[in-house]
Amino acid sequence: MGSRTPAPFWRTLNPGIHGCTPAHRGCEQCFMRSIGRRFGLWPADGSVTVDPVEQAVQRIRDLPHPRGNSRCLVTTAGDLFHEAIPAIWIHRCIEAMADRADVEWYIFTKRPERYYAVLDLFKRFRRWPPNVHACCSVCDQETADRMIPHLLVMPSPVLVVEPMIGAVDVLYAAYTGAESVSAMGGISWVLAGPETGPGARPCDPAWAHDLARQCREAQVPLYWKGSDPTMPKETPHV
Ligand code: SF4
């Protein structure tokens, strides 16, 4: 997902996705867009392609067995839920992840509106696997309002606020008007952090501390990336 730091994950795995396109303001500094094309990892024409699904499934099956931390982040170099990737391809990958119950899989996306197509396939064939975690990346209130309602349809959803380039009121974003929302609407974990690298857009510590307050009040663990002393403390063991 264009993020530089995979912590707190044991490792990352790209099952076979090549290329990506921006989904929202959070993508503006995507480091993979330049690196991926410069080193031939992404198609030069800006398209998004995937390897044959059997190859992708095999990569997932072949992941070494973890020791200790078993969290694997699914690709920092693309978006599994990109609109160019067929739902059945995504479904087969997630089925393979389900069969690797020794690994906790974390799938980051900026396209949570595609959850429904894949969820439909799981309703037909199998239950959503408990070791596969849907993680949705927002960066400010506009993206939070638009994307969090989709995230909340997933079991034990994980909210990612990175790069944080604006304040985010999670309860406001989770409120649909249909009923009151408490405890962040069931979000199980929040990962957040500022933008990093050349040209990084600023993150106001007040936004970060307000997000930390919301997490404390809802008793939802927060993992804050980075060691800036003006920001919330990193919580490495959540
Ligand atoms: S979704 Fe992730 S990988 Fe794709 S352009 Fe945005 S930051 Fe980059």
Image: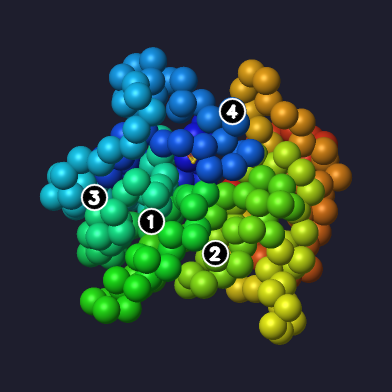
Q: Which residue occupies 68% across, 68% down?
A: 174
149 in relation to 67, above or below = below
Q: Residue furthest bottom?
A: 179
Residue on which the image places disc 2: 151
Q: Which residue occupies 66% across, 45% down?
A: 139
Instruction: Find the distance from the CA under tag 2 to the CA under tag 3.
Output: 24 Å
Instruction: Find the distance from the CA under tag 1 to the CA under tag 4.
Output: 25 Å
Q: Is mark 1 within 8 Å of ligand 1?
A: no
Q: Which residue occupies 62% across, 23% down?
A: 197
Q: Are marks 2 and 1 in contact (CB under 8 Å)?
A: no
Is residue 198 visible in the rendered image? The answer is yes
Q: Amino acid at mark 2?
A: Leu
Quadrant of the image occupied by residue 87: bottom left
Instruction: Find the distance from the CA under tag 2 to the CA under tag 1.
Output: 16 Å
Considering the image in quadrants, where does the C terminus appear? bottom right
Residue on which the image places disc 4: 29
Structural crowding at the residue carrying mark 1, measured as other residues with C-alpha within 10 Å and reported as few (<14), some (14–19) or many (≥20): many
Left or right of residue 24: residue 9 = left
Q: Amino acid at mark 4?
A: Gln
Q: Nearer the viewer, residue 188 or 8?
A: 188
Is residue 224 visible in the rendered image? The answer is no
At numbered mark 4, what does the secondary structure look like: helix, strand or loop? loop
Residue 221 placed where, x, y %? 64, 61
Residue on which the image places disc 1: 105
Point out which mark residue 60 bears.
3
Q: Amino acid at mark 1?
A: Trp
Structural crowding at the residue carrying mark 2, measured as other residues with C-alpha within 10 Å and reported as few (<14), some (14–19) or many (≥20): many
